[in-house]
Amino acid sequence: MSALHRQLGMTDAEYATVRAILAREPAPPELAMYSVMWSEHCSYKSSRVHLGRFPSEAPWVVVGPGENAGVIDLGDGWLAAIRIESHNHPSYVEPYQGAATGVGGMLRDIFTMGARPIALWDAIRFGPLDDPEAGAKNAYLFDGVVKGIAGYGNAVGVPTVGGEVEFDDCYTHNPLVNVMCLGIMQAEQLQLGSPGQVGDIGVLLGASTGRDGIGGASILASASFEPGSEEKRPSVQVGDPFEEKKLIEACLELYDKGLVTGVQDLGAAGLSCATSEPPSRAGVGMDVDLDAVHLREAGMTAAEILMSESQERMLAFVEPANVDKVLAIASRWEIESAVIGSVTDSSLLRVYHQGEKVVEIPAASLTEDAPKLHRDISQPGWLAELWDAAPVAGSRPTNDETLLALLDDPALGDPSVVYQQYDHMLFLNTLVGPGSDGSLLRLRGTDKALAGTVDGNGRLCYLDPRRGSERLVYEAALNVAVTGARPRALVDNLNFGNPEHPEVMWQFTESIEGISVACEALGIPVVGGNVSFYNEGGGSNIHPTPVVGVLGLADPVPRTAPGLNRAEAGMEVWVLGDFDTIDLAGSAAQRVSWHVLAGRPVQPDADLARRLTEVAATLAHLVPVLHDVSAGGLAVAIAEIAIKSGVGATIEEERWDHLFGEAPHRLVAVTPSGGPVETVAAGLGIATRRIGTMGGDRLDIGGSNTELATAKAVWQSAIGSRL
Amino acid sequence: MFPGTNCEHDVAYALQEQGATAELVWHTSEDLSGFDGVVLPGGFAHGDYLRTGAIARFSPIMEEVARMAAGGRPVLGICNGFQILCEAGMLSGALMKNRDRSFLCRPVHLRVESTNSILTREARVGQVIQIPLNSYEGNYVAPAAGDQVILRYCGADGEVDDESNPNGSVDAIAGMANAAGNVAGLMPHPERAIESVLGSDDGALLIGSFVASLQPA
């Protein structure tokens, strides 16, 4: 049997560091704490040295990266808290609970900041549903993840208002489940993860602690999958949205009454993290009594209690005089509570179990002394060949064939089979909901609204992680701009392969550079993020898949936001932006018609992106339909408008490469004649071209002649017909 | 409201928009004196890990709700509230899992079948309205109940058929009342359709009917 530290996922070098810090052999519970806190998932040891590149400052940033969530100022006394996180590996091992607890953990990060969670977005990626070998498994994972998000989000009472679904071979052995959560609060409700004063009492609130999720951070999230992954199932936590709902209400009442001096959620690394992070931030210590922790099962060891990732738990720091009031509020909301320790001036974390001191370590050593790795970086050798290859070879299919094949693609088809399983209307804020470029939520009591989107594109980032990532930000910014909002903050979920592979680290650093350049160009601060490494399986790494979430502010809220369903017969169809560049590298048409991934995506134009985003945010207050051109190109963008509006279109653009290419910086606007498109665009130097008219019951795009009803039927069944 | 209820703020907002004064009352309360009517909002009372409403019917407040119902006061159950009223025997029938075994959140069309209820008194029979549905267990099962059926699922044209029935409910029943009409329940959420900017304001008709039914105690 290998040494304990290796069983816990630690290297020999890390073990030696622990010995040096303590100047003795660590006891098993101590080693357990180091193993989870120094895991890739908790310590960001491979990524930390690179994350400082992100621009994170703007006048409206209240809390930047490093806290439980980023916080920005919305004006009128309101703050928004936002965060994104992955739950990829748990969702592969147990899709329903993996996805459900991903939602639960996200929510706790938001209400830990003092905010009420008001909306969720999810970006989910799987292997193809109709794969001859893995299709059934992929469909099982897809269905389980969607039902897990629905089961938790609907019951806890936070609407899921948007997201994206993608399918690609590279996710067959490692699906991606990324969840973004938005919360709002009045400025005075902001909570920071501070431990308060020396002498303050730690009160553990919520669910009891059990053996579920032990080692979730270290064993599951920070390692690759091998055959036999089902043995890791005990490392997946089990979610209880009912408990979480009560915990949210109880915590918000505690903040409202000013009864806590600090609060920390128990997520990855459980009590190990919650009892060490807040004290180490403040340079103090904490004494913890594990016998006071309410347990789900008897006979748990100290290490198990410290490592458990049982869900729906919070640690509140409370002045001694307020403890009884806190316990009474917990009781009223029918949640359990326990006084488990106190803040000390020792800077030590001391843990007692069954009357004995089982841990005595410097609290800050769990966080500040965590390893920082400078891993090797090198550009993959195979990339040059891909860049030289023609994106598509030989003759093109007809416009008709291509359009129908794209509408039949599950990543482009009607996602309502997914989002109709999510409550997306609770709280009566949803002005623009799922199935749109971006979602728009009104902020009641003000004349403002918040827009949000999540976007990823693994194919583009595989071909060029820097350009792909930069374009991702521009696309996300356009997605919020077409709702009438201006982008205000970005969070990133960096899903990558094995960081021990130098080419993965190259993809990672290139992606950070691309996101950073775009954020600088648009003036968007990065306020938080999450890194997920070791996404690999079946012998290969996933495509580098950064997912960005962008939050926008519409001020004022558009009287009626643009909708894809608001086109009417007789309206004009316009294209704005760059209609000369052709880019088929990584496009959906390339995948659907040629089943290849080759070529080099074009370099985006940062200044054009900035001006087009501004034009979109302005026009959104003036035109009925405004749609970002992305996957599937111009033809699919127009088909979506026609299908959702129930009216055909005649488009005078015949060139296949222009209809199905995916060059960045393009918008489609549909407007009554005499509309403001030309004037507004000209003001910012954006080119416009009228390309057609809405009307009839056919999709006549460049001489193709598809019945609208046929196109709609194909689009609607793209996912459902493969389940 | 019960632990796990989550539509309480939306319902209070809708009632206020329709001119009523609304207050949230916790399920352990045993006193509703001073209130003119009760709404049980949607959500997942007590987690709904058992049959929906099976635990909520035993919450202390339910005796008081039953007393108000017996006294002719308006009592309305929306979604989970409808399930609880059925479980408590104040309305007939029961709600099972949807035909497709999936949660379903989307707008549905409803046809008014009877105006003899606190929910539909200001509508007219045959009127078609659009309101969001949001449930996993919305499949109504019971023998048909005459004019106690107040709302049915239908198409945009008012036609009731299998295609327009979103969850497999018997006779496409979406809402029920008791014989006196003062207790009513429905699966769709009228509070989510009180402003056209949210997609529909047809729900104002139903919430408005309830508010108009309130008489000072």
Image (cartoon, rainbow, N blue to C red):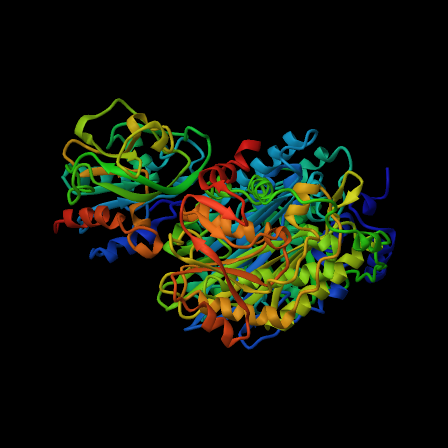
Residue B153 percent across, percent down from the top left: 30, 34
Looking at the image, which residue is at 38% across and 61% down? A672
Q: Foreground: A315 or B39? A: B39
Of the 4 image quadrants, the one containing the N terminus of chain A is top right
Q: Foreground: A413 or A357? A: A413
Task: Say if B50 sits above or below A12 in the image.
Answer: above
Residue B99 percent across, percent down from the top left: 42, 28
Residue A549 percent across, percent down from the top left: 58, 59
Q: Is residue A423 left or right of residue A388?
A: left
Q: Is residue B88 left or right of residue A412?
A: left
User: Would residue A588 be visible to someone looking at this image?
Assistant: yes
Q: Foreground: A641 or B117? A: A641
Task: Say if A319 sits above or below A217 in the image.
Answer: below
User: Would residue A186 be visible to someone looking at this image?
Assistant: no
Q: Foreground: B215 or A547? A: A547
| Quadrant assignment, res B5 | top left
- In this view, the residue farthest toward the left is B216
Residue B1 percent across, percent down from the top left: 33, 46
Of the 4 image quadrants, the one containing the C terminus of chain A is top right
Q: Is residue B192 left or right of residue B121?
A: right
Looking at the image, which residue is at 65% across and 37% down? A128
